[in-house]
Image (spheres, helix red, strand yellow):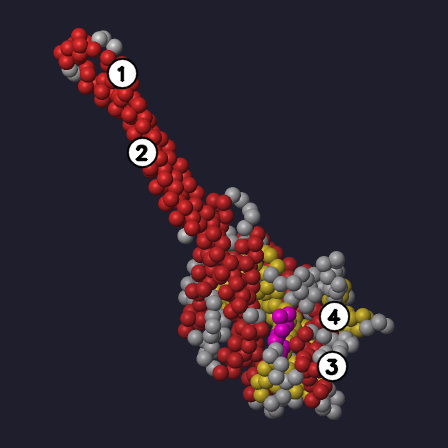
Amino acid sequence: MQVKVERETSFVRFVYPFALSRECALGNLVEALRDSGWKDERFPEGDLLPHVRDYLNSSERDNDATAYLLTYCSEQLLQHYSGRLLVDNGASAQGIPFTIREAQLALFRGGIAMLTLEARVDSDCLADWLDFIYHFRFYKGQADDKQDVSAPRLEYEGRTEQGIHTLLEELLQSPIESCSSRENLFMYNLMLPFSALYIDGDLSDDEKRRLLYRVRLCFTMRHDLHPPEAELRPDHPHLLEYAEQIWFTFAQQAAGFVAFNAPGNANDFFRGNLPQRLRNRYFLLYQLALYQKFRLIHLSNRVSQNWLSGDEGQRRRTFREIRDELLEFTARGYFAQVMHQEQHHRYYSRWCEVLQLERLYQEVSNEVREMYEYLQMNLEEQRRKQAEKLNRTVLWLTGVTIAFALPSCVVSGLGMNVQTIEAWDARYGSAWWIWVVALSVMVGALLSVLLVRVINYIVSRDSSDKEAV
């Protein structure tokens, strides 16, 4: 029996993740998207936990909403960009026909967005599907020195273009740039494929393991592979067996589902209901895992970019904003569990492990907290030094005041006792008061120096104790 792909059941979704500027008001952007041909949808709820459901399908429809899901209305535009993928096989350009079936846009609070294109290869040849997955994900023109893979040539109704970036720009450029700017979050010129392949035919166990390896890492049938034995083991941590001979694959750059000779027909669960579950529930779980990953990476990038920019006051304000964003993400967007059902929970948990979300969260949380605390400590140190400087100034002024206060009191006392002064003038001569004033000046100066040294010693010891702590 020849190996074939059930093309009516199989599909591939390509995810283009990007970040919006922080100044973008999410509600205003959604209004611009609606005016550009997008319509509102609801995230599939299924067995979502209540707090996740409320996060995704919020009743709010303004700038405080937590997430939006939109689909593109114009099938004509998507059909316009459906055509053939031209693959150079060494002799001639092989044409792989494909159809773009849907464009979907998910917007999350915090500025993370994902554009998804769903495509189907109009062929039952397994090599065509693997070629399509490998090449189509390179969306942006010819490669340059940043990348060693050229974008595919796509033929649309007689015209040829490099990559699918023209469609991406047509879907996003007008509404996005009217409200915000966008920043690519993944590897240069790459989308993330989420593929679901129903494969029928006779394959040995070894061939199945090698095919799972190709799907997981997006290799074509023409790639000459020699994977280590550990990569082909059925208990590999990046593989999850859903049912007998039905597998999920996990990787940093792709998500996959492969069903070998799935039982039943289009009216049964495995070939009828399960493909819809893959499109909604399982794809949503993949989106949520990606959202958390890219949100944390985006926060980490902001930490790196702002650590040396601006003065210390500006950095302190920026890091206060980053800290507040991290706290908001922790409260509203960081999910340890998402769904009730066992299979869905296992799938989501595996993505959390593969993408190392917990480790990434701890890393970002630690760096934000430590750097913010460092800036706060510097601020407290500056305030302490300013207070200490002010105290020393006041201390010296106090000493000077004491030095002049005692002679002033002596002179005032003498001025109020004229008869006594006249008697002392007759007894000690007219210059005796000079010695009295001089003595008071010396005593006042001695007292002021002694007081200043004692208080200065106390202040210095207190400062040393604080620095030691």
Give the amino acid at mark 3: Cys
Residue wearing tag 3? 125
On whether residue 249 falls in the magenta region, the answer is yes
Relative vertical location of residue 341 with respect to residue 134 in this rendering, above or below = below
| Among numbered discs 2 and 4, the one appearing first in the sequence | 4
Residue wearing tag 4? 85
User: Residue 318 versus residue 68: which sits nearer the camera?
Assistant: 318
| Among numbered discs 1 and 2, the one appearing first in the sequence | 1
- Name which residue lies at 29% across and 26% down: 444
Distance Cα–Cα, label 4 vs label 1: 110 Å
| Among numbered discs 4 and 1, the one appearing first in the sequence | 4
Disc 3 to disc 4: CB gap under 8 Å: no
Which secondary structure lies at badge 2?
A: helix
On whether residue 393 falls in the magenta region, the answer is no
Give, as a single range, the part of the protein colored magenta.
248-257
Outermost residue to the front: 427
User: Residue 432 versus residue 302: which sits nearer the camera?
Assistant: 432
Residue wearing tag 1? 435
Residue wearing tag 2? 451
Which secondary structure lies at badge 4?
A: strand
Where residue 252 sits in the image (x, y, percent)? Answer: 62, 70
Q: Is residue 75 visible?
A: no
| Among numbered discs 2 and 3, the one appearing first in the sequence | 3
